[in-house]
Image (tube, coloured by chain):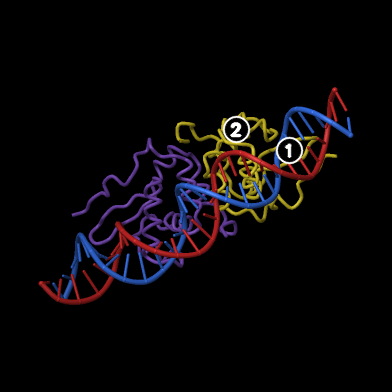
Chain colours: A purple, B yellow, C red, D blue
Amino acid sequence: MDAEITGAHPPRAELRLPKVLAALADPARLRAVRALGRLGESPCTELLHAAELGIGRSTFSHHQKVLREAGILHAEIRGAQRVLTLRRDDLDACFPGLLDSVLATDGKYLD
Amino acid sequence: MDAEITGAHPPRAELRLPKVLAALADPARLRAVRALGRLGESPCTELLHAAELGIGRSTFSHHQKVLREAGILHAEIRGAQRVLTLRRDDLDACFPGLLDSVLATDGKYLD
DNA sequence: GAGGGTGTTTGACGACCATCGAACGTCGAT
DNA sequence: ATCGACGTTCGATGGTCGTCAAACACCCTC
């Protein structure tokens, strides 16, 4: 049965800018978010490969948790896998222009 | 004689998004940047008080250095004090919309 | 129900970070 | 020359972070 990850997603009113910025500040997480922005949605392992992060599964799991707890992405259990999506509506409501800016930034300014 | 702080300000082409985000992710630095956005320009001590950071001078000096090395602000020696300004043009050129978003975010999403 | 794929959790380790106080250098004014 | 305001630098401390490997839990399929 499909299900939410209860308790792990902060509601919109509890999003905080410093936490969001800190979550986006790590190069691996930033690449994952930008890849997810292109893909629309993606299971963890698929995103791990698509973003070419060069890190292990457990480390990615940690990053995914940080992004989730910052309110940046949403995880939904679908069958055997967790499908990740960006929380575009909530981010745009709280921090207008921030996500668009991060997704649109030229790749030459990444590393 | 008035002077630049040579060597401490990265040129526009060397700005990096993870570094900028990391610099903005600290609550004290974020408040300082937002206060500086309101003031336009400000000497260190004045900004330290205007932003109500609750930290000492040496700690503020450290934060100012982090922001400067990330390319977020510019420091100019004017007489006995350092006058700080945001590098709006460079930030807007590299990360369109980012600074505006950070400055415009509602204060209720800060802490 | 056995097996393979998927992702999490735990413990550990090294690196980095925010903070402070004290000492220092510099500038303008007295 | 001395003084006070301004800001930096240094060393130390306590906390947080990114990474990994190993072990675990879950789900789907055969």
- The residue where tag 2 is placed is B35
The foreground one among B26 and B20 is: B26
The foreground one among D5 and A49 is: D5
The answer to whether residue B16 is visible is yes
Quick one: label 1 or label 2, which is nearer the N terminus?
2
| Circle on res. B82 | 1
Give residue D13's position: percent from left, percent from top: 52, 48
Q: Amino acid at mark 1?
A: Arg
Tell me the crowding category of disc 1: few under 14, some 14 to 19, or many 20 or more residues within 10 angstroms, Cα based: some
The foreground one among D7 and D15 is: D15
Q: Amino acid at mark 2?
A: Ala
Residue B60 quadrant: top right
In this view, A21 is above or below C10: above
Name the residue located 49 percent from the left edge and 55 percent from the top edge. Answer: A26
Name the residue located 66 percent from the left edge and 40 percent from the top edge. Answer: B86
* Camera-side mark, 1 or 2: 1
Give residue D29's position: percent from left, percent from top: 18, 71
With B80 as the anchor, is C12 left or right in this view? left
SS of the residue at dot 2?
Answer: helix
In this view, B111 is above or below A99: above
Label 1 and label 2 in one chain: yes
Chain for numbered disc 2 = B
Count of marks placed on residues: 2
Dot 1 and dot 2 residues touching (CB under 8 Å): no
Name the residue located 36 percent from the left edge and 56 percent from the top edge. Answer: A41
3D distance between C-alphas at marks 1 and 2: 16 Å
